[in-house]
Image (spheres, rainbow, N blue to C red):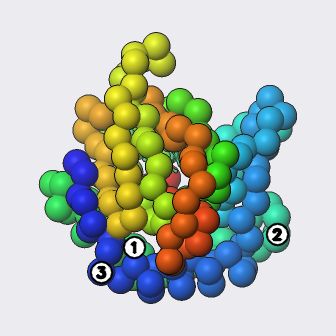
Amino acid sequence: MLLCGFACPGDTAIIRAIKSIARRSPFRNMTTRGGHTMSAAMTNCGHCGWVSDARGYRYETIDPLTGKSWPDMPGMLARLGHRAAAAAGFTDFHPDACLINRYVSGSRMSLHQDRDEADFDQPIVSVSLGIPATFLWGGLKRRDRPEKITLVHGDVVVWGGPDRLRYHGIATVKDDRHPLTDHARINLTFRKAH
Ligand code: MD3
Ligand code: FE
């Protein structure tokens, strides 16, 4: 379910919270198991955070870059994720992880499934901020031709039920400017990892 502009009220507070998180756990370009560097920079907040390195993908309670726990998920962000899930009919969504992706011109995310979470009955809530991007919404098989959906500042999408394991990605981001994020797109994904 696409909730257009759901995150617009409070957007400046969200950006401020992300800057505070990134001072403690900086954005970094993680590597894949295959040794490729991801073009989107990432950090996390919450009890656990998504990490990728030569050993693969997983959730960790310690940020490997700092050796400390990930920054707490601000109540304001946890409530945003909870409210969006509820608006889409998912009650009792209490995220324990929030992955924060930062894209600039040339960044992309290739088609993948999100399968590192314990319970696929729990939805994922994504919040788009800053410059627009073309979201690629595929099917349950990698070869299914993805639909293109433009996501703009403030859009929130709730992915659950039969769509939870659909392949998805972000097409190469084009340069643009937004008053709150300058040349970047920031995407938050609220997850129940454990
Ligand atoms: C559809 N991020 O972090 S969010 C990711 O915009 C990721 O940064 C993209 O894919 C981004 O894993 C897309 C939207 C999203 C997230 C999870 C999904 C779409 C999804 C899970 C199932 C189906
Ligand atoms: Fe994903």
Q: Secondary structure at mark 3?
A: loop
Q: In the rendered structure, which disc, 1 or 2, sits on the residue that comes first in sequence?
A: 2
Q: Which three-letter amino acid code belongs to the residue tagged 3?
A: Pro
Residue at position x 26%, y 68% in the image: 6
Q: In the rendered structure, which disc, 1 or 3, sits on the residue that comes first in sequence?
A: 3
Q: Which three-letter amino acid code belongs to the residue tagged 1?
A: Ala
- Please tell me the numbered disc located at residue 67: 2
From what the image shows, is residue 168 above or below residue 82? Answer: above
- Please tell me the numbered disc located at residue 172: none
Residue at position x 62%, y 84% in the image: 20
In three-dimensional space, the C-alpha distance between marks 1 and 2, rounded to whole angstroms, equals 24 Å
Residue at position x 43%, y 34% in the image: 136
Task: Determine whether, in the image, residue 1 is placed left or right of residue 159.
Answer: left
Q: Secondary structure at mark 2?
A: loop
Q: Secondary structure at mark 1?
A: helix
Q: Which three-letter amino acid code belongs to the residue tagged 2?
A: Gly
Q: How many marks?
A: 3
Write down the residue under mark 1: 78
- Please tell me the numbered disc located at residue 9: 3
Question: Mark 2 or mark 3, which is nearer to you?
Answer: 3
Q: 61 or 177, which is in the foreground?
A: 177
Q: 145 or 81, which is in the foreground?
A: 145
Q: Position of residue 103 (x, y in %)?
A: 61, 55
Q: Residues within 10 Å of mark 1 (few under 14, many from 20)?
A: some
Q: Position of residue 69 (x, y in %)?
A: 70, 72
Q: Position of residue 127 (x, y in %)?
A: 40, 61
Q: In the rendered structure, which disc, 2 or 3, sits on the residue that comes first in sequence?
A: 3
Q: Could you tell me if the residues under marks 1 and 2 are in contact, i.e. CB atoms within 8 Å?
A: no
Residue at position x 30%, y 51% in the image: 158
